[in-house]
Image (cartoon, helix red, strand yellow):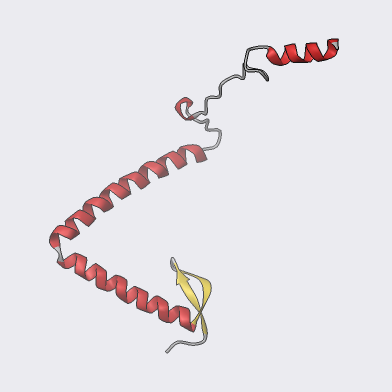
Amino acid sequence: MFSEVAPAIVGGNMAVKMTKQDRIWQAQDDARTLATAEVIIQDKPRLALAQKAAARMAEERQKEAKAMGNIAKPGSKTPPSEKIKRKKRTTGFSGSPGSQHNVFQRIKKK
């Protein structure tokens, strides 16, 4: 049934070569996944909660995709609310404004 090494189907693409042991594990894992799905489908309250969670997750992914699309547009700029605001450095070595300059001046005078 399983040859020693065969291509794995990943997202519909023949992407990775799998060993016989990996294919057996994958088949067992898929069987467990299908059994769990069947249990969820039969449990109406659990199915309803899963459907609501899926709707929330889909909405979140759509927001992420929209944001990514905005960034991917040629010539697009980051919205002002998204820009990182950096504070100007006003302190020197001792923590008071201009102290770095004063330190260098004292060194030069010596």
- Please name whichever residue, 83 or 104, is drawn nearer the observer in this view of the structure: 104
Up the image or down, 94 lies above or below 16; here it is: above
| Residue occupying the point 86% across, 12% down | 110
Answer left or right for 107 relative to 72: right
Q: Residue furthest bottom?
A: 1
Residue 12 drawn at (x, y percent) = 44, 68
- Against 80, is 43 above or below? below
Q: Check the image and report above or below for 21 versus 64.
A: below
Vertical arrangement, residue 15 with respect to residue 61, above or below: below
From the viewer's perspective, tell me whether residue 89 is left or right of residue 11: right
Q: Quadrant of the N terminus?
A: bottom left
Q: Residue pushed farthest left?
A: 44
Whole-percent x, y for residue 20 in the image: 48, 83
Residue sitting at x 44%, y 65%: 11
In this view, the residue in front, 81 or 105, is: 105
Task: Single out the residue that lies furthest toward the front.
Answer: 110
Residue 58: x, y in percent?
32, 49
Residue shown at 44% from the left, 79% from the top: 23
Tell me where residue 43 sits by quadrant: bottom left
Whether residue 19 sits left or right of residue 40 in the image: it is: right
Task: Tally the marks.
Answer: 0
Percent position (x, y) of residue 92? 67, 18
Name the image quarter holding residue 93. top right
